[in-house]
């Protein structure tokens, strides 16, 4: 229509506003839905954006870096925070990290390229006796008389328990030959004469007695507890420098050029820590962080019961002095506790100390850490210990490496997040030993074997099979029946009689020029990840490296998809809200249109074209949408602002990770508001399209019909 | 079509011409023959009443002349142009520029005030400056005597006042023909008389053609020509003496 557009628009807007005002209830209902929808979009998208930013900080600054490079032919997708497999994922390999680093480091905006290799190792804690013997050997070597006496006492007590165990087994076993031999060894060690050398000065005699215990007695006692430890081999000093969430908690960093392990504090606390302590921690966290009450929560109540039942595991660990001292302390704290039939005083008191309810939890928790914890081993290792890690190499042979624990670490802000415990850190050389890359000595030996069998070339797989899988005398049968083939480590273990760390230093070149599984790329601030990803990919392609480049989200595994999932859920919720809004707006506009047939007919009769009618109806919802959208966006922004001030507490460990800290402080961006307004306007238009179409079909003769 | 006086139209010919017009309405399986062969010529400046009992076809006839409907058979010509040959859009444009409507139930836009209701057709037409438009509206509102009520909404006005607004709205575009379907049916006789007098005044001064229907003998008396419909046919068509 020709018309005067501006003046027409003005009168239309006025008609829309007044029409809205004259249908207050309808406008209020539709308006409220729109306000709610817009506020939801603003709050939802703001929160998600903040979570995504938090998650990015968590992932990028702890393990992944901005980009990850790995074998283009890898069978599985990289999953740094754990994927579907239990470390059995095949990420292929990057044969020569040095070259990758040279190529990628040269690019603009690349701050660091960090070598990495994930693996899963089995870590044996050793039986109680193993560990008592380790400690006794240390006391003997150090000439610590007091510790020695206490430990001898402890070993003797463990021998008693072991003797009883073996005797029980004997009663129910047909072939007793082996058991009889073991019993004989234990009985020998129980004689006073066996312990006589420990009172004297003859170090050799003491060592001989310890060797007997280590080799003949202890093996009869079983393997002790096994743990699985996910490790990430890397350039440890570089890792510490570029992943700024990384922080040493206890001990010290592994020095440049040295082998060593840094235990993940979160992993240690949730997987390795003494069960009783772990249970108390969980109860305490639930009470202090989530205000949960044991009385109201069956799961917590079960934990409390379990903690109480584990008193025996604590009393067994105590040295006689500690047992006596603790009995006294406990008696003072629990004067009325009486042991039940057959229970020792200490057991009864310990049980009392571990009995917690909502009222006593805080005090007993503190008591546990002040009085009991210092006298027992909370973790199966101490900083400075040497752990034996066993892992299957790529070819499926068991290898073991002794590695020193230099310290524990955490990722700042993520301390409480289970996901931050995804990996422990080891040096790259230890990783390669476990991965199955041959040392120079092994390569030399392989050459000798090749010469012997007259082969020109032996490929890597065959070589490894020949090396680790052959039936030669360097392969040792271990108790669980698996074969572990690193003769060098096995020899070290045998020679020392106890665990000694593989402490061969290595040069930077050795570390860089070798196999890794993946590499993290840290970008300079402000470099766009997508753009850098393309450049890095182009560079490695140009260099002929068969690598794929993925961003942090893809590299992190399932957790990286998490925000996508929440976003999907939010979208669904918003979608549902808006579909409801759509239906309601559609219905009410349709009804309004039907009520206005005479008015619309009149407008058509006096010369309004269909377009004018269309605009009139559409504008009404649009104006309502704009007003409600404005109010909703304002409310949403205010809500996000308030949440940003107060912070949303991360109630569980996944949230700690997603929030990148104990609280999320969301912020609202212009983008969030814009998206919300656009969405509400689009919904308004869609929902009014049909009623508007109906309105345009109203015939001008409708104006003539009598009222 | 720019001006209301349509300079291109043959000034000599009839402004409205119906020839052998029939209009059928489907009613279920039946067909209602609302008009059965109507021939009618209306000259420029006439003041003509269509009379007849309820159901005789008055509204149907006005709808055809008012271009809100087209005949089943026969032709309706407005200034020589047959309405059957025009598209819906063209008919709308024709109504906007040539015709004015006054309804039995006033049919004002409830959310707009007096001024805005009167202004609406001018906004739809466009072409005037804002100042010209406002002046024209103010003049028109003054002409129907509603200047004090300019900013009131229809529901604040009496029936007679509302119909004055409708008259102002119909006339503000200076149409060639004004259609009024029983404009006084919802008014008391005094008010109705005043409304017809107002229309007659305007007809006298501006020479606007008025065609209105009524079944009220009093109102018929104001017309200068009376067309009587019975059962869709013209039963009588004669001038009315000024004295009657
Ligand atoms: N839309 C319609 N559908 C069916 N019949 C109609 C319609 N409009 C009018 N009629 C019928 O046509 C005849 C003439 O009606 P109308 O022109 O409204 O008469 P009047 O205005 O003189 O009362 C009546 O019988 C009426 O019932
Ligand atoms: Mg009628």
Image (tube, rainbow, N blue to C red):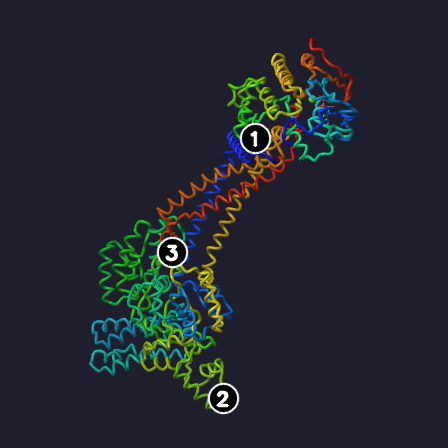
Question: In the rendered view of the protein, which quadrant contains the C terminus of chain A?
Answer: top right
Residue beneath disc 2:
A455
Most foreground residue, A204 or A565: A565
Residue A585 rendering spot, x and y as whole percentages: 55, 38
Comparing labels 2 and 1, the label whose residue is closer to the camera: 1
Mark 2 Cα-neighbour bin, 10 Å: few <14, some 14–19, many ≥20: few
**SS for callout 1:** loop
Residue B98 rendering spot, x and y as whole percentages: 66, 27
Position of B228 compared to A698: left or right? right
Q: CA distance from mark 1 to mark 3?
A: 64 Å
Circles 2 and 1: CB atoms closer than 8 Å: no
Most foreground residue, B243 or A171: B243
Q: Quadrant of residue A612?
A: top right
Q: CA distance from mark 3 to mark 2?
A: 56 Å
* Residue A660 tag number: 3
Q: Residue furthest toward the top?
A: B243
Mark 1 Cα-neighbour bin, 10 Å: few <14, some 14–19, many ≥20: some
Residue A128 rendering spot, x and y as whole percentages: 33, 70
Mark 3 Cα-neighbour bin, 10 Å: few <14, some 14–19, many ≥20: many
Residue A637 rendering spot, x and y as whole percentages: 41, 44
Inspect this view and state whether residue A25 appears: no
Inspect this view and state whether residue A580 appears: yes
Residue beneath disc 1:
B128
Dot 2: chain letter: A
């Amino acid at each position: 229509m020709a018309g005067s557009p501006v003046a027409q628009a003005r009168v239309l807007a006025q008609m829309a506003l007044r029409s809205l005002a004259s249908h207050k209830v309808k406008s209020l209902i539709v308006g409220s839905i729109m306000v709610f929808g817009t506020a939801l979009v603003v709050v939802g998208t703001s929160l998600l954006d903040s979570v995504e930013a938090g998650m990015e900080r968590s992932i990028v600054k702890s393990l992944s870096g901005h980009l990850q490079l790995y074998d283009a032919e890898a069978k599985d997708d990289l999953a740094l925070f754990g994927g579907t497999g239990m470390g059995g994922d095949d990420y292929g390999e990057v044969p020569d990290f040095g070259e990758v680093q040279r190529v990628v480091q040269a690019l603009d905006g690349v701050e660091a390229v960090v070598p990495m290799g994930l693996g899963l190792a089995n870590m044996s804690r050793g039986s109680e006796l193993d560990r008592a013997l380790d400690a006794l050997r240390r006391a003997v070597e150090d000439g610590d008389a007091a510790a020695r006496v206490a430990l001898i006492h402890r070993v003797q007590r463990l021998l008693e328990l072991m003797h009883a165990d073996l005797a029980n087994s004997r009663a129910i076993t047909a072939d007793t030959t082996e058991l009889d031999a073991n019993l004989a060894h234990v009985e020998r060690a129980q004689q006073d004469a066996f312990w006589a050398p420990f009172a004297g000065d003859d170090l050799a005699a003491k060592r001989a007695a310890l060797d007997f215990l280590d080799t003949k007695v202890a093996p009869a006692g079983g393997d002790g507890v096994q743990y699985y430890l996910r490790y990430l081999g890397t350039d440890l000093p570089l890792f510490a420098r570029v992943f700024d969430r990384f922080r040493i908690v206890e001990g010290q960093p592994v020095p440049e050029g040295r082998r060593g392990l840094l235990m993940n504090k979160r992993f240690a606390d949730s997987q390795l820590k003494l069960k009783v302590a772990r249970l108390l921690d969980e109860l305490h966290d639930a009470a202090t962080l989530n205000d949960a009450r044991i009385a109201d929560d069956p799961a917590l109540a079960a934990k409390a019961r379990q903690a109480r039942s584990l008193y025996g595991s604590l009393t067994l660990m105590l040295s006689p002095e500690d047992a006596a001292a603790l009995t006294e302390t406990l008696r003072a704290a629990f004067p009325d506790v009486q042991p039940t039939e057959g229970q020792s005083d200490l057991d009864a008191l310990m049980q009392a100390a571990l009995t917690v309810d909502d009222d006593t939890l805080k005090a007993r928790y503190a008591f546990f850490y002040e009085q009991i914890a210092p006298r027992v081993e909370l973790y199966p290792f101490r900083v400075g210990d040497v752990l034996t890690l066993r892992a299957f190499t790529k070819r499926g042979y068991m290898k073991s490496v002794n590695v020193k624990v230099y310290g524990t670490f955490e990722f700042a802000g993520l301390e409480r997040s289970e996901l931050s415990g995804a990996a422990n850190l080891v040096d790259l050389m230890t990783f390669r030993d476990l991965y199955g890359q041959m040392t120079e000595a092994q390569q030399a030996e392989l050459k000798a074997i090749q010469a012997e069998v007259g082969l020109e070339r032996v490929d890597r797989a065959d070589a490894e099979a020949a090396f680790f899988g052959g039936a030669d005398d360097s392969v040792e049968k271990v108790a669980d029946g698996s074969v572990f083939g690193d003769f060098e480590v096995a020899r070290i273990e045998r020679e020392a009689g106890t665990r000694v760390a593989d402490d061969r230093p290595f040069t930077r070149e050795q570390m860089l020029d070798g196999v890794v599984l993946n590499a993290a790329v840290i970008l300079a601030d402000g470099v766009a990840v997508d753009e850098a990803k393309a450049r890095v990919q182009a560079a490695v392609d140009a260099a002929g490296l068969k690598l794929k480049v993925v961003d942090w989200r893809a590299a992190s595994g399932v957790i990286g998809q998490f925000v996508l999932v929440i976003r999907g859920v939010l979208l669904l919720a918003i979608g549902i809200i808006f579909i409801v809004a759509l239906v309601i707006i559609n219905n009410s506009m349709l009804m309004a249109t039907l009520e206005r047939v005479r008015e619309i007919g009149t407008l058509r009769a006096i010369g309004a074209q269909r377009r004018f009618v269309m605009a009139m109806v559409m504008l009404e919802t649009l104006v309502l949408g704009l007003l409600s959208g404005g109010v909703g966006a304002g409310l949403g922004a205010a809500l996000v602002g308030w949440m940003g001030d107060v912070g949303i507490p991360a109630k569980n460990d996944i949230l700690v990770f997603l929030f990148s800290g104990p609280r999320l402080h969301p912020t609202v961006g212009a983008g969030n508001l814009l998206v919300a307004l656009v969405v509400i306007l689009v919904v308004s238009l869609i929902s009014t399209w049909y009623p508007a179409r109906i309105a345009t079909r109203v015939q001008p003769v409708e104006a003539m019909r009598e009222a | 079509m720019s001006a209301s006086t349509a300079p291109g139209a043959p000034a000599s010919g009839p402004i409205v011409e119906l020839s052998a017009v029939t209009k059928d309405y489907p009613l279920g399986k039946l067909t209602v023959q609302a008009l059965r062969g109507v021939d009618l010529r209306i000259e420029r400046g006439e003041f003509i009443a269509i009379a007849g009992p309820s159901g005789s076809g008055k509204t149907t006839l006005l709808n055809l002349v008012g271009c809100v409907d087209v005949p089943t058979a026969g032709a309706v010509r407005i200034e020589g142009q047959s309405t059957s040959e025009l598209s819906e859009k063209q008919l709308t444009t024709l109504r906007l520029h040539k015709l004015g409507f006054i309804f039995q139930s006033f049919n004002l836009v409830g959310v707009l005030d007096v001024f805005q209701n009167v202004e609406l057709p001018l906004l739809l037409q466009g072409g005037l400056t804002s100042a010209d438009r406002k002046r024209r509206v103010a003049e028109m509102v003054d002409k129907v005597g509603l200047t004090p009520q300019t900013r009131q909404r229809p529901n604040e006005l009496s029936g007679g006042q509302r119909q004055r607004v409708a008259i102002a709205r119909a006339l503000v575009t200076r149409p060639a023909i004004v259609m009024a379907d029983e404009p006084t049916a919802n008014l008391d006789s005094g008010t109705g008389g005043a409304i017809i007098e107002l229309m007659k005044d305007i007809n006298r001064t501006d020479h606007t053609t008025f065609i209105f229907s009524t079944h009220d003998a009093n109102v018929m008396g104001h017309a200068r020509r009376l067309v009587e419909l019975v059962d869709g046919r013209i039963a009588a068509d004669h001038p009315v003496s000024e004295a009657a």
